[in-house]
Image (cartoon, grey):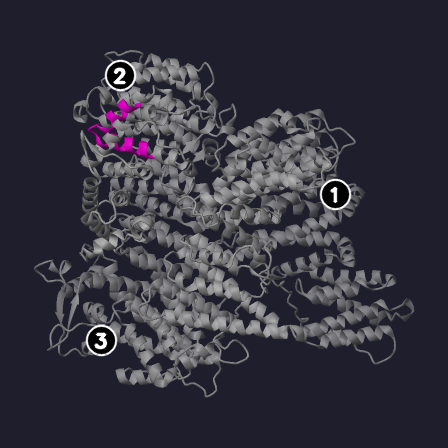
């Protein structure tokens, strides 16, 4: 997309009248040939003009005339007047005005002899500006100084000449800004403007000092004693220091002030060792090194060296030192080396203490800046750098280790900027290592690089920082280095492309790898003297293209979506010639082959590759056949109607996308679109619909752009062909338009309507439905019926269809729509007005769309008058002039519609005031209000002509909103609005509520809340006589309404919603009428008093409403209001949010059970109210309101000794609920992160409260914070590492939680000992363990324990002794992150040593179980993270064998037996174990002995006799038995053992064991089937007999489904012999049984699908085995009925998909067979 450059605004010269006359008078001369007089005349003409462009031209002319002057022509006074005029105009113009640049050019072009006089004139004018400015003039003068210094040599000379005055002025300006800042609290716009002015002034002062360094140095050296310049510089330094230490200033200003401090010190002290000493002192906050500085400088700098200074000062001084000091080439002295090494130490110390994410961003940026400075220091090759510096900067040094720890802690940071800077820092550290170790160029010979690479590759792939770090290694050492270490890296990365969150990172790394690999292969071939590219390109294709094609053909579609988006285009850009290789490879694998189930197959892969190539411009153009004949036409047609959505989309993308938007569409491509469109309009997938519309838009844009190109071409030889193409375009677009309009029949499905309306909208947007013959004249094919069908779509129940249809109606030809016909317009208007009073909420939306459609009709006011006369409404619309413009017609129509709706609403509100029940039943109020809001949204309120009428109307609307709210608020503000149960004691609300209840509820019963009540109307009520349209009549004699409490409630809360939306719309869209201090009145339609009144209304509704729908939607309107307050020009309104916030916080603090604030319903609307006020604060500001609010709320949320009663804990409950809402608010972004630690502490401590309300609110807050810290759950696995964080990263981001969690854990662990047998559960123990279990160890942690995690371990181990099972499990999960990978073997061994070696009387099984769980989780973590076996001599195997009694019957506790077995399974179940082969063999032997003597094999003891935990114990035995019998039987004991164990497992009484066994068998069968192996040996005749017998007698549905699935897999390869004990069943008997199962299993989808599949396989086998004509008729009939029932519409999707699959598999045998077995059974 081409973005037009923003042009500067040209403004004319604006001078006060007196100055203007003086200048013109001084230039007034009579004719003459003198050059000076010509200049004067030109300038005089310039001043007399008011057109800025002409003024620029005259100034340029004057510049040329000045340049042509010679010294002899000079006329002293007149020339001086000319120069003075130019200088005065120059200093009066605003910044970035082109006229100012023209004057600078004119002044700069004066001849050399005139330059001094020019400088004197400009200096005089600038000096006048600097002398006595007002505060309002400061920004303009600063801009003038900046303009003088910006490429204007004469201006720079002026600044040098006036240096003391300029610096003095800048000091005055900064001092004024510092003073003003203290008085702008709450006025965010003014504060932001002040920050901008302050930043500009600081930058300008820096620029002046930088450009005038020689002048400053000379002046300071010349002055022996005190001089004026010293005072000015001292004052400026004082301002900089004030900015640095005042946290109210935004970071951009503070960071610039830090640079200014260092620059000023450098300007005064030079570049020797002394400045390094001073800056070191500032960084260390020590005044000892300041002695070398001048006395005045020392005194000022001492203000920065106080212990109480904010931590950000060090950060900004570091930034200043790196940016303002020169680090290139050799360092000037040893103090500079000290400073260079002190900067990262200071920054890393800050890194632990900072909380704000924005500050973390600055730290990351400054660290990267430091690494760049360090690299600059090492660039000098002539002189060696000091050995100490070399040692400190090389890899493996303490500094590099600490910096790497910073990188590992921040490469997962939520801010993109931090992650990007972290990657840059990592790259620079590698470069530093290279520069300090020049002798080692080969990375394989560098132990530091080798170990770093191995550590990175061992990391989990979900860590995003890993990708950037590996990219840096590829950039510096080449792809060959990584491919040599891990050859499967391309396949591994392609496998990650299915995850949307990882795909961009994986694709970037892949791009780096294949580009680097290609360059390396080419360089190697060139070095070897090979010129042909075929050999090395084949190697490159084998490495990168072959794995890609395998993934595209065989992986599931959802795993390959992002390959097309991220990876394939990059690969084709790198190697366009690879397309031919891809097409050839895919065509060799038969493009029609389907591939595995759920994959796109070769055809889909071919479409994907071609689409990417086409979009990149790699594929040939279609103008000479379809893409150069790469693909047959029939193949494309098949792809466009493929069964997989993504294949269809790729094929459509291949047709629609093009590298050139002007590429002509061929007739074949149009035929393909015709082939695709109609079958795909009814797609049920939103993603497919969205892609289809997007691709069709690209196609239509191609048609538009290429048709414009064809029409421009005039050459005769191409004219006939171009005309033919345009004719084809016209036919195609008309066909498309007609087909889409024909789809929109009444009753058409949602997806068809949506797709058709989207595409028709594109046609209207790109080509218009005009009837003119010049274009394609699409309007000619639109008929009245078509337009009527589109109008019907406006009444759809789907909001998106309504919106699209309404937009399309405005694009269709007016003659087809017919709204200009008065009768038709009146019908539509009448329908809209009736719908606006409907009790169905979506009818009011339809009414709003219809009214917006009518607003552009000139005769609408007459139709409204007609309706008003019919309904007897007093309506006087505005008069419309005869020839009104479109804008005026729209304004008058809008005014008339709102007036009419308002009159209707007034009468309906009056009726509701007398009977809310009748209003809810016959004319709910919300429809009219919704229509008013919708009509207002389409009005341009900034350019209204009838402002007087609008002001009156606005006042009426606001008053009507308040009346509506008064009517319905008693319901939504009651304590139980859903049931209207009067529990309020407040007299104001209860009086109105009682009135309603008397009307709608009988006095003697509560039947109203269960049954509808019939309300008879009174004969004398005139209002009810008119309501006959939407209310059902209950008898012939009078009207009646069937009304429920829900109808009343819906009426009330929807009315509150529409009131909120209307008030919010009025405040947001209408111009404000206000007067500020300058007494200038800004005319508008809504006054400050009205806006404040609306704000107070929202306050009342949000703080007192109980109904969630009411206060949530009031919040939407209030957000609009707060946004408007922040941006308004009124000072009074800007300060309202701060005032309201302070008031509500005071009210929360003092709240009690008698307060009107709602303490239940999660504090109802109070959090919404505070959210809206805080979110209006600009993110770029200092966020003072947010900080103040969070401090007060956290103080309230923290428990205290005096808050133990219900009455005193109400503020605490409010605070916890409000904090929860603020932490969830995404608009607060990273600004809320600094308060996460405090919030988590409040949530954990809240669990210790004796008050239930506090504990409940703490639970909700804790849950929100877990999501805020660890992210939204990204999968079903609760403990997935995608929602976890390394211990280093967690405690680095939230350092305050380290001591808190440690203290709380110590306190909780002291209560868990279960020696007494009593359960002691600390309230917050579970929360602590939950947080700690979300952490995990990082393989990058090295040998040191980051942030001292070791102190947590003893307490977590002690928690494992708890009597509560869940606590022991959580402790086991929580211990994992606190044990480094290298320490896992020793920790596991020490835990095993704590277990008793033999049975004893005082054994604590809780202790044993907790210890075994910790061992189990540590081993699993090690298995996942280390990818290598345990080190030799770890003693784990021996310790386990010594305690094997724990798995045997000697152990009376089945829970600990099961836990010990789980440990054995972890070590023995894998083919490659963590232990050595000899150790694991011995362990397997003993485990097998335990297994064969266990309850699973020797007897079928019921779980009841084994006691609690028996099922888990038997499942642990089953997992061990499965490993021995199914997974790796050859390593356990052979086939005879397999048969015995499988028989025991399949005959186990516990269904959980049978289900686990069947899942294991099924998984093994599917894996071996996928690998093309024959039936495994484990399934001998005995096992098959057990399986068939189980299928006949199993009663548990899940087990039965699994065994049927196993038999399906087995039956697909060969026929089975079905046995039931010794009895062999025939195929007919088996089929009858399976069909009966399918018939009786409709309650279980899984079982139903399995029975259907197996029955279908049996039917095929039965038909194949019977002779022709001897088919089992009854069985086939039942099967056919079963398949038909599975295809019915009400069946679940899974069942219908399985039926489709079955039909496909049975086609050859049953449907297309010449014997027609089903046909015969159908005739019987």
Q: In which quarter of the image is the C terminus?
A: bottom left
- Mark closest to the chain's N terminus, 3 or 2: 3
Q: Which mark is residue 1029?
A: 3
Q: In the image, residue 1022 lies at what x, y percent?
A: 18, 79
* 1166, 791: nearer the viewer: 791
**Is 1521 drawn above or below residue 603 in the view shown?**
above
Residue at image position (79%, 71%) is 62
Q: In the image, residue 1304 lies at what x, y percent?
A: 36, 29
3 vs 1, front mark = 3
Q: Quadrant of residue 370?
A: top right
1617 to the left or right of 893: left
Q: Residue 1448 carries which label?
A: 2
Residue at image position (25%, 73%) is 908
Magenta segment, which residues? Answer: 1538-1562
**Is 773 drawn above or below residue 985 in the view shown?**
below
Q: Do the residues labelled 1 and 2 touch (CB within 8 Å)?
A: no
Q: In which quarter of the image is the N terminus?
A: bottom right
Residue at image position (45%, 26%) is 1349
């Amino acid at each position: 997309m081409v973005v037009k450059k923003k042009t500067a605004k040209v403004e004319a010269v604006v001078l006060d009248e007196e100055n203007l006359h003086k200048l013109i008078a001084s230039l007034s001369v009579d004719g003459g040939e003198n050059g000076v007089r010509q200049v004067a005349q030109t300038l005089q003409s310039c001043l007399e003009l008011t057109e800025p462009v002409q003024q620029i031209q005259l100034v340029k002319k004057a510049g040329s005339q000045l340049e042509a002057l010679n010294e002899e022509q000079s006329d002293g006074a007149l020339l001086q007047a000319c120069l003075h005029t130019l200088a005065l105009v120059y200093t009066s113009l605003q910044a970035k005005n082109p006229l100012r640049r023209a004057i600078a050019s004119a002044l700069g072009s004066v001849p050399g002899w005139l330059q001094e006089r020019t400088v004197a004139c400009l200096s005089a004018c600038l000096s006048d500006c600097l002398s006595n400015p007002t505060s309002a003039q400061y920004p303009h003068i600063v801009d003038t100084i900046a303009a003088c210094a910006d490429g204007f040599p004469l201006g720079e000379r002026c600044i040098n000449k006036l240096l003391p005055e300029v610096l003095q002025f800048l000091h005055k300006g900064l001092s004024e800004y510092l003073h003003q800042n203290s008085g702008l609290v709450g006025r965010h716009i003014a504060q932001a403007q002040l920050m901008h002015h302050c930043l500009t002034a600081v930058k300008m002062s820096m620029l002046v000092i930088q450009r005038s360094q020689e002048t400053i140095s000379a002046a300071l050296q010349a002055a022996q004693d005190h001089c004026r310049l010293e005072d000015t510089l001292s004052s400026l330094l004082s301002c900089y220091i004030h900015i640095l230490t005042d946290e109210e200033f935004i970071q951009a200003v503070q960071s610039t002030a830090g640079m200014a401090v260092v620059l000023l010190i450098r300007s005064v002290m030079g570049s020797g060792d002394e400045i390094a000493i001073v800056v070191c002192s500032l960084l260390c906050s020590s005044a000892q090194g300041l002695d070398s500085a001048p006395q005045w400088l020392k005194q000022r700098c001492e203000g920065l060296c106080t212990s109480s200074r904010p931590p950000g000062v060090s950060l900004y001084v570091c930034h200043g030192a790196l940016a303002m000091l020169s680090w290139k080439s050799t360092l000037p002295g040893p103090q500079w080396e000290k400073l260079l090494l002190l900067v990262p130490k200071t920054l890393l110390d800050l890194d632990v203490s900072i909380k704000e994410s924005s500050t973390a961003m600055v730290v990351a940026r400054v660290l990267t800046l430091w690494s760049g400075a360090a690299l600059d220091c090492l660039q000098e090759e002539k002189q060696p750098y000091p050995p100490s510096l070399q040692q400190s900067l090389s890899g493996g040094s303490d500094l590099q280790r600490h910096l790497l720890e910073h990188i590992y802690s921040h490469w997962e940071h939520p801010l993109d900027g931090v992650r990007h800077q972290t990657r840059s820092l990592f790259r620079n550290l590698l470069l530093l290592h290279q520069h300090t170790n020049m002798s080692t160029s080969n990375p394989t010979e560098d132990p530091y690089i080798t170990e770093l690479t191995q550590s990175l590759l061992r990391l989990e792939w979900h860590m995003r920082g890993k990708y950037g770090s590996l990219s840096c290694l590829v950039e510096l050492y080449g792809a060959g280095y990584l491919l040599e270490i891990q050859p499967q890296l391309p396949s591994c990365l392609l496998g990650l492309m299915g995850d949307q969150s990882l795909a961009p990172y994986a694709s970037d790394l892949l791009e780096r790898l294949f580009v680097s690999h290609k360059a390396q292969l080419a360089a190697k071939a060139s070095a070897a003297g090979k010129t042909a590219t075929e050999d090395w390109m084949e190697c490159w294709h084998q490495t990168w293209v072959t794995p890609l094609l395998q993934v595209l053909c065989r992986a599931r579609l959802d795993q390959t979506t992002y390959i097309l988006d991220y990876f394939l285009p990059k690969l084709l850009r790198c190697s366009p010639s690879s397309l031919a290789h891809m097409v050839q490879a895919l065509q060799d694998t038969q493009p029609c082959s389907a591939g595995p189930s759920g994959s796109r197959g070769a055809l889909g892969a071919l479409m994907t590759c071609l689409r990417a190539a086409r979009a990149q411009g790699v594929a040939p153009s279609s103008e000479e056949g379809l893409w150069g004949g790469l693909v047959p036409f029939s193949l494309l047609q098949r792809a466009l109607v493929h069964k997989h959505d993504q294949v269809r989309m790729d094929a459509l993308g291949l047709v629609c996308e093009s590298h050139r938007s002007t590429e002509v569409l061929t007739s074949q491509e149009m035929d393909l679109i015709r082939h695709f469109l109609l079958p795909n309009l009814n797609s049920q997938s939103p993603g497919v619909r969205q892609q289809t519309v997007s691709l069709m838009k690209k196609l239509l844009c191609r048609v538009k752009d290429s048709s414009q190109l064809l029409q421009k071409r005039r050459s005769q030889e191409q004219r006939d062909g171009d005309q033919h193409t345009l004719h084809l375009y016209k036919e195609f677009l008309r066909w498309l338009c007609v087909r889409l309009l024909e789809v929109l029949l009444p009753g058409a499905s949602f997806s068809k309507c949506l797709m058709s309306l989207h595409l028709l909208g594109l046609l209207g947007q790109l080509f218009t439905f005009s009837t003119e013959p010049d274009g394609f004249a699409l309007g000619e094919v639109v008929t009245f019926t078509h337009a009527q069908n589109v109008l019907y779509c406006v009444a759809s129940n789907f909001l998106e269809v309504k919106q699209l249809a309404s937009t399309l109606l405005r694009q269709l030809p007016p003659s087809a729509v017919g709204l200009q016909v008065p009768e038709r317009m009146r019908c539509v208007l009448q329908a809209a007005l009736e719908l606006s009073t409907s009790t169905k909420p979506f009818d009011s939306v339809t009414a709003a769309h219809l009214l917006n459609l009518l607003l552009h009709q000139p005769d609408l006011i007459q139709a409204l008058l007609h309706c008003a006369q019919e309904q007897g409404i007093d309506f006087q619309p505005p008069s419309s002039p005869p020839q009104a413009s479109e804008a005026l017609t729209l304004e008058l129509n809008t005014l008339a519609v709102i007036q009419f709706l308002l009159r209707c609403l007034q009468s309906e509100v009056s009726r509701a005031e007398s009977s809310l029940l009748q209003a809810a039943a016959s004319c709910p109020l919300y429809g009219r209000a919704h229509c008013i809001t919708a009509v207002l949204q389409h009005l341009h309120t900034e350019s209204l002509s009838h402002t007087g009428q609008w002001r009156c109307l606005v006042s009426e609307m606001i008053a009507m909103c308040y009346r509506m709210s008064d009517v319905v608020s008693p319901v939504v503000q009651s304590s139980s609005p859903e049931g209207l149960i009067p529990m309020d004691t407040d007299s104001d609300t209860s009086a109105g509520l009682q009135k309603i209840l008397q009307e709608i509820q009988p006095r003697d019963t509560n039947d109203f809340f269960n049954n509808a009540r019939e309300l008879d109307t009174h004969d004398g009520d005139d209002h009810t006589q008119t309501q006959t349209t939407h209310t059902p009549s209950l008898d012939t004699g009078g009207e009646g309404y069937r009304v429920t409490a829900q109808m009343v409630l819906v009426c009330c809360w929807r009315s509150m919603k529409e009131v909120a939306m209307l008030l919010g719309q009025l405040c947001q869209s209408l111009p404000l009428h206000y007067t500020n201090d300058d007494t200038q009145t800004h005319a508008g339609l809504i006054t400050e008093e009205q806006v404040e009144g609306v704000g107070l209304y929202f306050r009342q509704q949000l703080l007192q409403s109980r109904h969630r729908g009411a206060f949530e939607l009031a919040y939407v309107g209030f957000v609009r209001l707060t946004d408007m307050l922040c941006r308004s020009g009124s000072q009074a309104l800007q300060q309202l949010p701060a005032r309201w916030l302070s008031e509500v916080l005071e009210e929360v603090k003092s709240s009690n059970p008698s307060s009107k604030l709602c303490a239940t319903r999660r504090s109802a609307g109070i959090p919404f109210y505070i959210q809206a006020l805080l979110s209006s604060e600009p993110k770029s500001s200092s966020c003072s309101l947010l900080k103040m609010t969070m401090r007060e709320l956290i103080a309230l949320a923290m428990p205290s000794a005096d808050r133990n009663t219900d009455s005193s804990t109400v503020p605490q409950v409010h605070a916890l609920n409000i904090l929860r809402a603020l932490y969830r608010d995404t608009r607060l972004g990273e600004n809320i992160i600094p308060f996460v630690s405090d919030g988590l502490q409040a949530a954990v401590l809240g669990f210790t409260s004796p008050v239930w309300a506090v504990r409940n609110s703490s639970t909700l807050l804790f849950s929100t914070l877990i999501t805020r810290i660890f992210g939204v759950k990204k999968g079903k696995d609760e403990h997935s590492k995608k929602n976890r964080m390394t211990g280093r990263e967690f405690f680095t981001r939230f350092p305050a939680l380290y001591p808190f969690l440690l203290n709380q854990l110590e306190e909780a662990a002291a209560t868990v000992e279960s020696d007494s047998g009593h359960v002691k559960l600390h309230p917050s123990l579970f929360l602590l363990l939950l947080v700690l279990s979300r952490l995990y160890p990082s393989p990058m942690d090295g040998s040191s324990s980051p942030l001292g995690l070791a102190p947590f371990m003893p307490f977590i181990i002690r928690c494992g002794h708890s009597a509560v099972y869940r606590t022991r499990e959580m402790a086991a999960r929580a211990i994992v992150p606190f044990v480094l990978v290298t320490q896992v073997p020793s920790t596991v061994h020490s835990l095993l040593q704590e277990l008793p070696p033999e049975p004893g009387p005082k054994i604590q099984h809780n202790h044993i179980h907790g210890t075994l769980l910790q061992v189990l989780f540590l081993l699993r973590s090690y298995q996942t993270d280390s990818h290598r076996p345990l080190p030799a001599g770890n003693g784990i195997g021996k310790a386990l064998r010594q305690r094997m009694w724990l798995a045997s019957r000697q152990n009376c506790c089945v829970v600990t037996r099961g836990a010990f077995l789980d440990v054995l399974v972890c070590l023995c179940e894998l083919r490659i174990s963590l232990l050595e082969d000899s150790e694991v063999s011995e362990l397997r032997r003993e485990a097998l002995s335990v297994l064969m003597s266990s309850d699973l094999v020797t007897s079928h003891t019921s779980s009841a006799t084994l006691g609690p935990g028996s099922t888990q114990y038997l499942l642990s035995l089953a997992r061990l038995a499965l490993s021995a019998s199914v997974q790796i039987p050859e390593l356990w004991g052979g086939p005879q053992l397999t048969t015995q164990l499988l028989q025991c497992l399949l005959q186990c009484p516990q269904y959980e064991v049978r289900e686990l066994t069947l899942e294991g068998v099924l998984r093994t069968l599917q894996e071996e089937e996928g690998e093309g192996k024959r039936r495994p040996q484990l399934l001998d005749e005995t096992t098959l007999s057990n399986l068939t017998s189980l299928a006949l007698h199993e009663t548990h549905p899940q087990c039965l489904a699994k065994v049927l699935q196993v038999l399906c897999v087995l039956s697909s390869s060969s026929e089975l012999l079905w046995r039931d004990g010794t009895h062999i069943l025939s195929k007919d008997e088996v089929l009858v049984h399976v069909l009966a199962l399918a018939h009786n299993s409709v309650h279980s989808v899984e079982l139903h699908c399995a029975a259907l599949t197996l029955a279908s396989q049996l039917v095929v086998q039965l038909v194949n085995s019977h002779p022709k004509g001897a088919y089992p008729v009854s069985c086939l009939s039942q099967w056919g009925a079963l398949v038909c029932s599975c295809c019915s519409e009400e069946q679940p999707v899974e069942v219908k998909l399985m039926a489709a699959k079955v039909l496909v598999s049975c086609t050859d045998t049953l449907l297309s067979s010449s014997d027609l077995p089903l046909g015969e059974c159908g005739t019987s």
